[in-house]
């Protein structure tokens, strides 16, 4: 069972809170969901939307055609006209009118697309035409008189203020969606109370409860989808930023620096909100969260904190990481176990600040001038973040090198409702690496050892030097050619050890049919899409072996050669233009992919478009399919 | 200080051969810093010396305490992380004028804004020495030092004026050849509970043939000898801003006469550590660098409370 709900509205109008209340009510019925959040780089007024896939088993992606549209404004209607599934349920304002041109917040291109669609169907380019278009697709309409209900509520609730009343329109739409899904008024009201009962002295809840009740009454408690309450375990609702923050707190960070940037800063905000950490013995500890003057200070202050002995990290996206690379080089030559969370968004430059991308893989791997050992590790699923972050910290400290946790915007802002136990991770371990315990005045920070790892002392524990110059064992500057060779090799050979020490399932992860001769290789969030796709492909008799690249640097070339042996078709699936994972694979193993699925619109890969792409490759021998779904 | 304390017998000089030009102003700053540390009696392990890039950047290698030689302009940002993660460490920073006021100007301003207890010694010689004498941000307009093709067309940054206006709570000026005076100021700065700037005037004997030792010696005078007292004595006085106004005026004096000494010192402004502590539970009393995070490899953090907040009920 899978129901796709499209919720759209003007950014900053309260849609987010209202949709959280709806999704909370859905999860309370025992359903999981995956939702993607799409928004402009804008505070108020532009069209944003949240597409939620409700299901009884875990799904990891959205699909093009929605089953229910939840809308307040005409912008939403025009914007998502093309993606209405057959027989979709349409919740809209009863008072909707106007032409496409009057939907002023839409970009011209979006207006033209909607216009062409209606024109092609011989319809007028306005709300009436749009509704007729949907009618021909067998849509079921549920017009709601939002302002009328608002008026009724104002009479029921004493001293209701206008701002709150206006925002109740969001709740009316969500109530309609809840009702049509089959959620009882009582349960939906419970969800409202959970979020709103403590705000504005209860007034907020009172207004919204009244609004919801009115909507249920008007709809005569009718249901379209009739979802039933399932037996279920305790659930949590998370997004990628939240889990990344959660993971860092579990891993014991005591310092997080950041400079505000989309889509990374929500992670730092989350850590700051939870900076007084509860410990298992009942005591508390503190995390210093520092908002810096720029990303250079973010990375260098985090390095300073790491030298002082804490587990420290910073978090950014492409433009910020561009500034951070000088710090990465310094951490490299000084063997500092700094962890950076790198959220990829659309580039170059400011690019698409709030949209998804995977175009920074090569940048992460090749960051900074010179050569130095580092870890680049990728995650694509919310449920993998905690274990992956734990591994990244452990690798950084065990091998004393900077580490990049590479994630993408789609992971950051998509929302999952999943069983609580998935995040209550028991198996996480903390390895702080080799530590120096000798005479503090006889310490050699960069002692030449067999595996290249020199026991670490924190600032204050022993006397030593750091420098960005090439250095001797004490940490003083050297330009001696012989010593240069030894120190260089010491730093680089740690990577060989690391490759040997990491279990195969942490280098890449496999899903689907391992015996299939069709392999789809990917990294980041498209892995979730492919997991959904491989189920869909079974209907066409195609079985897919999915390989999610996780350890990007150092690259486990031999393991890749092994896993790809005998594959007739190798398809790389990536959200970039050039196919960076395919290039990396070629560079490191000499293996060429046979086809590519690429997307650079900034929107996540939907399962239906990706499924079609794989079919076109397997059945029609297409070599390159470019995906375009999503407004 | 007991004689068996490590600092009593600790030699604050490293054994390295010093590769600065003979007669360089940096020597005076190095010797003063070493003397100040000796006299302060801090545990040598408890001191971290952070530097930027350029001739001044090498200072950390010559001081026998833990030294962190960082990136061009970034010394203060590194130092910020060190101090916040382990508030018990005494953190000293050496940075050049080009280093700190050119490429690192943003961090200079941010340090004042935060008022973190860190001592910044600004090696101010008006030129980028190590790259052969280009004009640095403190070089006066119209001046043509040896390596310049034509007179400097950029205006000069006034480091003390900038520090005062951005919130440093200890602002002083010293002369690198006055080791005694500089030593005393470094000691006061290290003891100060807030951001401390020491603008150290120093000749670059190789590339700055204008602002020479003699040039400075003809102009410098002691503020305290003329009865100037920049120290804020009470909360009321801090509130009134009178001392700050006097310091701002004094900081503009840089010509025929150049004042040396403490321009401003105000301990009534809470440091950033206290600000950070107000949002936390035990900080800065508890030291993040010493907080246990695991036992036998198992995390000591209890996520239950946070997870419960994310739970669907």
Image: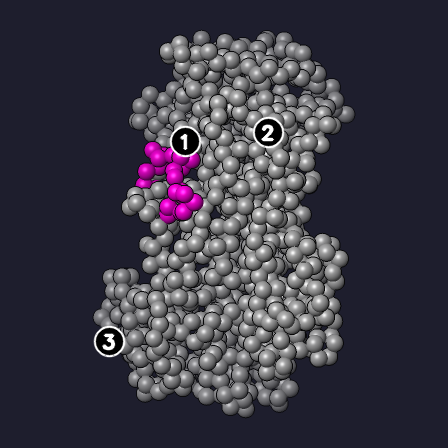
Graded by Cα atoms within 10 Å as few (under 14), some (14 to 19) or many (20 or more), the crowding at tag 2 reads: some
Of labels 3 and 2, earlier in sequence is 3
Q: Please, what is the dominant secondary structure of the magenta stretch?
A: loop
Q: Position of residue A138 (x, y in %)?
A: 51, 90
Q: How is the image coloured?
A: one colour
Mark 2 lies on residue: A447
Residue at the far left in the pictured view = A158
Question: Which of pointers 3 and 2 indicates the residue nearer the eye?
Answer: 2
Q: Which residue is more in the foreground, A129 or B36?
A: B36
Disc 2 on helix, strand or loop? loop
- Tell me, yes or no, whether dots 1 and 2 are on the same chain: no
* Residue in view at x 74 percent, y 76 percent: A621
Disc 3 on helix, strand or loop? helix
Task: Answer whether residue B282 is magenta in the image.
Answer: yes
Q: Position of residue A465 (x, y in %)?
A: 56, 26
Q: Quadrant of the C terminus of chain B?
A: bottom left
Mark 1 lies on residue: B87
Task: Answer whether residue A159 is magenta in the image.
Answer: no
Q: Which mark is residue A156?
A: 3
* Residue in view at x 68 percent, y 31 percent: A486
* Residue in view at x 40 percent, y 66 percent: A419
Q: Which residue is more in the foreground, B196 or B243?
A: B196
* Magenta-highlighted residues: B279-301
Check whether the beta carbons of the residues at disc 1 and disc 2 lie within 8 A of each other.
no
Question: Which of pointers 3 and 1 indicates the residue nearer the eye?
Answer: 1
Residue A239 seen from this side:
yes
Q: Numbered disc 2: what chain?
A: A
Q: Which mark is residue B264?
A: none
For this view, does A396 lie left or right of residue A520? left
């Amino acid at each position: 069972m899978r129901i796709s709900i499209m919720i759209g509205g003007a950014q900053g109008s309260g849609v987010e809170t209202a949709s959280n209340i709806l999704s909370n009510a859905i999860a309370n019925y025992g359903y999981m969901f995956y939702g993607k959040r799409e928004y402009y780089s804008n505070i108020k007024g532009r069209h944003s939307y949240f597409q939620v896939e409700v299901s009884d088993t875990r799904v990891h992606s959205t699909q093009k055609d929605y089953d229910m549209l939840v809308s307040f404004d005409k912008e939403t209607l025009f914007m998502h006209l093309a993606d209405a599934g057959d027989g979709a349920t349409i919740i809209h304002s009863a008072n909707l009118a106007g032409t496409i041109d009057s939907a002023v917040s839409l970009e011209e291109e979006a207006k033209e697309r909607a216009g062409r669609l209606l024109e092609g169907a011989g319809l007028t380019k306005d709300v009436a035409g749009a509704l007729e278009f949907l009618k021909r697709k067998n849509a079921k309409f549920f017009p709601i008189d939002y302002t009328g209900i608002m008026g009724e509520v104002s009479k029921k609730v004493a001293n209701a203020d206008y701002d709150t009343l206006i925002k109740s329109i969001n709740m009316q739409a969500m109530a309609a969606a809840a009702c049509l899904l089959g959620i009882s008024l009582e349960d939906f009201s419970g969800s409202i109370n959970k979020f709103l009962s403590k705000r504005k002295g209860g007034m907020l809840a009172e207004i919204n409860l009244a609004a919801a009740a009115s909507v249920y009454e008007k709809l005569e408690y009718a249901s379209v989808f009739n979802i039933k309450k399932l037996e279920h375990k305790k659930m949590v609702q998370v997004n990628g930023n939240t889990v990344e923050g959660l993971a860092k707190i579990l891993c014991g960070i005591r310092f997080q620096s950041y400079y505000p940037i989309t889509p990374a800063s929500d992670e730092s905000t989350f850590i700051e909100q939870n900076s007084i950490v509860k410990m298992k013995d009942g005591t508390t500890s503190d995390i210093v969260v520092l908002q810096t003057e720029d990303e250079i200070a973010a990375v260098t202050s985090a390095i300073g904190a790491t030298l002082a002995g804490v587990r420290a990290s910073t978090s950014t996206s492409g433009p910020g990481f561009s500034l951070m690379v000088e710090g990465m080089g310094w951490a490299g030559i000084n063997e500092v176990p700094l962890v950076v969370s790198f959220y990829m968004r659309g580039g170059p430059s400011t690019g698409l600040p709030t949209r998804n991308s995977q175009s920074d893989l090569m940048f992460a791997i090749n960051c900074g001038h010179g050569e130095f050992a580092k870890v680049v590790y990728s995650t694509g699923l919310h449920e993998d973040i905690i274990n992956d972050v734990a591994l990244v910290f452990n690798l950084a400290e065990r091998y004393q090198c900077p580490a990049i946790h590479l994630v993408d915007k789609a992971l950051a802002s998509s929302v999952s409702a999943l069983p609580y136990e998935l995040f209550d991770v028991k198996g996480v371990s903390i390895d702080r690496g080799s530590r120096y315990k000798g005479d503090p005045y006889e310490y050699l920070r960069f002692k030449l050892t067999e595996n290249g790892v020199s026991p670490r002392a924190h600032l204050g524990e022993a006397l030593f030097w750091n420098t960005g110059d090439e250095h001797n064992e004490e940490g003083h500057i050297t330009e001696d050619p012989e010593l240069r060779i030894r120190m260089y090799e010491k730093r680089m050979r740690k990577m060989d050890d690391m490759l040997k020490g990491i279990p195969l399932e942490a280098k890449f992860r496999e899903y689907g049919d391992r015996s299939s001769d069709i392999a789809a290789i990917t990294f980041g969030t498209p892995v979730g899409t492919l997991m959904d796709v491989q189920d869909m492909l079974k209907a066409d008799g195609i079985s897919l072996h999915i390989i999610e690249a996780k350890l990007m640097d150092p690259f486990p070339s031999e393991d890749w050669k092994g896993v790809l042996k005998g594959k007739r078709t190798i398809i790389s699936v990536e959200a970039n233009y050039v196919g960076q994972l395919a290039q990396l694979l070629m560079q490191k193993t000499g293996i060429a992919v046979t086809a590519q699925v690429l997307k650079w619109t900034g929107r996540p890969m939907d399962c239906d478009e990706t499924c079609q792409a794989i079919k076109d490759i397997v059945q029609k021998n297409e070599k390159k399919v470019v995906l375009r779904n999503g407004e | 200080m007991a004689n068996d304390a490590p600092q009593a017998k600790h030699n604050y000089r490293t054994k390295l051969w010093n590769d600065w030009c003979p007669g360089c102003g940096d020597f005076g700053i190095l010797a003063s810093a070493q003397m100040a540390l000796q006299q302060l009696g801090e545990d040598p392990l408890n001191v971290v010396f952070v530097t930027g890039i350029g001739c001044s950047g090498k200072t950390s290698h010559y001081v026998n305490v833990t030294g962190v030689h960082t990136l061009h302009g970034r010394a203060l940002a590194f130092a910020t992380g060190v101090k916040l993660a382990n508030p018990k460490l005494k953190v000293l920073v050496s940075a050049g004028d080009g280093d700190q006021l050119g490429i690192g100007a943003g961090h200079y301003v941010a340090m004042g804004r935060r008022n973190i207890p860190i001592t910044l010694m600004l090696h101010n010689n008006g030129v980028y020495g190590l790259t052969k004498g280009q004009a640095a941000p403190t070089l006066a307009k119209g001046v043509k030092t040896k390596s310049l093709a034509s007179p400097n067309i950029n205006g000069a940054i006034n480091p003390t004026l900038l520090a005062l206006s951005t919130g440093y709570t200890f602002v002083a000026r010293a002369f690198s050849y006055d080791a005694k005076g500089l030593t005393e100021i470094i000691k006061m700065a290290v003891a100060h509970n807030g951001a401390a700037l020491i603008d150290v005037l120093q000749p670059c004997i190789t590339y700055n043939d204008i602002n020479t030792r003699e040039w400075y010696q003809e102009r410098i005078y002691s503020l305290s000898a003329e009865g100037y007292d920049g120290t804020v004595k009470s909360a009321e006085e801090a509130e009134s801003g009178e001392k700050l106004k006097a310091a701002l005026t004094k900081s503009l004096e840089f010509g025929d006469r150049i004042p040396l000494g403490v321009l401003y010192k105000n301990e009534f402004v809470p440091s950033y550590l206290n600000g950070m502590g107000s949002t936390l539970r035990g900080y800065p009393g508890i030291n993040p660098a010493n907080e246990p995070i695991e036992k036998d490899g198992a995390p000591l953090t209890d996520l239950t409370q946070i997870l419960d907040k994310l739970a669907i009920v």
